[in-house]
Image: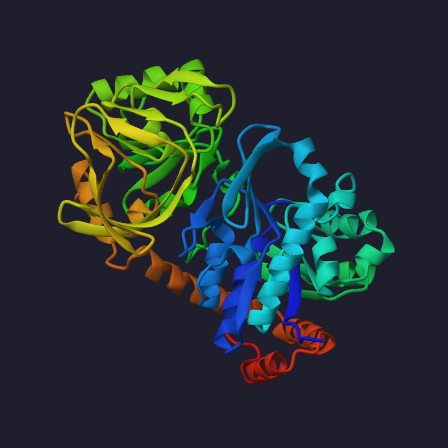
Amino acid sequence: MDAKAACIAILGTGSDVGKSVVATALCRHYARQGVRVAPFKAQNMSNNSGVTPDGLEMGRAQIVQAEAAGIAPHVDMNPILLKPTSEVGAQVVVLGQARMNAAARVYHEQKEQLFGVACAALDRLRRRFDLIVMEGAGSCAEVNLMDRDIVNLAMAGYADAPVILVADIHRGGVFAQIVGTLACLPEERRRPIAGVIVNRFRGDIEMFRDGISWIEAQIHRPVIGVLPWFSAFTIEAEDAVIIERPETVAGEGPCIGVIRLPHISNFTDFDPLARLDGVTLVYLYRPRPLDRFSAVILPGSKNTRSDLDWLAASGWREAIRAYHDKGGHLLGICGGYQMLGTAVRDPDGIEGRPGSTPGLGLLAMETELKAPKTTTRTRFAWDDEVGLGYEIHMGQTRCTGGRSLLRILARNGAACDDRDGCIGDDGRVLGTYVHGWFDSPAIMKRWLGGVGLDRIRVAALPGPAAREQAYEALADHAGRYLDMRIVDDLVYRSGSENGRGSGQRSLQCGRAGEGVG
C-alpha cells in the first residue's frame, strides 16, 4: 500500500471565523520547518478566485495558502469551486474549468460524483506532499446539509484527519459556538475533533483563563490557543463577509470608493489600496453623492447584467453618471469594465435569461457574454509601466471608439501582442479585464497620480513580496499564541497512521523548531 501524506483539518463553528487564516498560518509554519506542505479545500463557495500557472481557475484562499506553503497553486488544492450567480444558483468550476450553471438543488444531486472528484484530488496531493492542511467551509455542524457534506467532516473522515475547530470570539457567543457545534454532531462525527482554537481575541488574555478552563471541562478537549486580533499585517480574505461593514468616511483626507455590487467578485484586488497611508478605501452599498471621492471603482461581478439592473434600480446609475459629469474619475475592472460600456449582451443566457442590458455609456465599447471562459495569468504594460495580473471572464469586449488602455505582453507564459481595456475621451474613465492591477507599485502610483493623489506614498514592495512578509508575520503570530506541540502531535499521529515514510522523517525534523515565533 502506498504511503499517504499526513492530513490535518481546520473546520469552523461558522463562516468567517478564521479557518482560512489558521490554515494559512499552518502552511507557512510547516514550510518553515522544511515540510513539504500543501493546502486543500474540497469545495469552495466564493467569487474570489484566481488563476493557476497552467491557466486554470481555483479559489483565491487556496492560492494564498499555496503561496504561504512556498509552492505553485494547483487545482487539486481546490477541485470544486462554486461561484454564486444568484441567491439559489452558481457557476460550478470543476478542476479549474467552468462545467455548468446550476441551481442549488441540481448541484446537490451531483454531490456523490463530486465527492469522488474531490477525494481523487486529495489522493493525488497526498502522493506528492508530506502534509496536507485541509480547510472546511462554513459551519461543520449544519444538520440539514450533513448528509450531503463533501468538504467538512465527511472529507476529514475520508482522510482520517484529526480536526481542529476554530471559533470567533469577536462576534460573541464563543462558548455557545463551541459547545453548540459539538452538541449538534453525532458521536462518530465528534470523535475526530481533537482541539479548539479561539480566534480574534481582544483584551487581556488573563481575563479569559477561566473561560478556557470552562470550555475544556465541557468538551473534554484542549484549547490549543487563543489568537489575538492582529492589525499589523493583512491576509487576503476569502469571504465577502469582510466587506459587509458599515460605510464610514472619516476625517478630511482623500477617499477612494468601491461600489459594493450584489455579486461582487475578486474584491482582494483592492487590498493594496486599503494598506495605503493617507487615503481611505470605502465600500459603498447605498447610493450617495460622490463628490467626496478622488476616484470610484466598479469591481468585478459574477453577474454583470443583474448588477447593472441593480445600479439602475437603486439609483447608483444616476449617482455614478453625475459624479463623472462633475469631473470624477472612474475605474472599471472585469465586470465593472463591462458595465462602463454601452451594452452587455448575453444571447446564450450565460448569466441567466438571454437578452441585452444597457451599460453606463461612459466608455465607447460593448460586450457580448460567451464561452469559453478566459482564465490567464497576464503580463501587461500601461505605456512604459509593466505589471503582472490575471484575467477571469466570460465574454468579449469590442471598443467602438477611444483607445485601448493596456498592451498585453504575455498570457500564461506565452508572448503576445494584444490590447486590453479602454480609456474614455476625457481620460477620466478607465476599464480593464486585468485583476491584480494594484499589485504592481508602478501601476498603482501612476493611477493614483492620474486621480490627483500623486502625494500618496506607494511602497516599493510589490503585492507578492508584501504578501510574503504577511505570511511570515502570521506564522510568528500563530507560533506565539498556539501550542504547536499539540498540533505537531496531531500531525505526527496522522502521518504514522497513514504509513508516511519519508514524509514522517521530514515532519520529525521540524520538531527542532517547535514553538517557532
404, above or below 360, in the image: below
Q: Is residue 89 left or right of residue 1?
A: left
- Percent x, y of residue 499: 70, 78
Q: Residue at x 53, y 76 (%)?
A: 35
275, above or below 322, in the image: below
Counting labels gives: 0
Q: Residue at x 70, y 43 (%)?
A: 111
Determine the image quadrant of residue 284.
top left
Q: How is the image coloured?
A: rainbow
Q: Is residue 34 left or right of residue 317?
A: right
Q: Residue at x 78, y 42 (%)?
A: 143
Q: Residue at x 79, y 52 (%)?
A: 182
Q: Is residue 418 among the parts visible in the rendering? A: yes
- Percent x, y of residue 191: 81, 61
- Quarter in which the N terminus is drawn: bottom right
Of residues 227 and 295, the one nearer the viewer is: 295
Q: Is residue 350 left or right of residue 481?
A: left
Of residues 289 and 31, the one nearer the viewer is: 31
Of residues 33 and 219, the one nearer the viewer is: 33
Q: Is residue 56 left or right of residue 422?
A: right
- Percent x, y of residue 229: 52, 55
401, above or below 113, in the image: above
Determine the image quadrant of residue 473.
bottom left
Q: Residue at the far right: name it.
A: 187
Of residues 508 and 257, the one nearer the viewer is: 508
- Percent x, y of residue 264: 45, 34
Q: Is residue 206 among the parts visible in the rendering? A: no
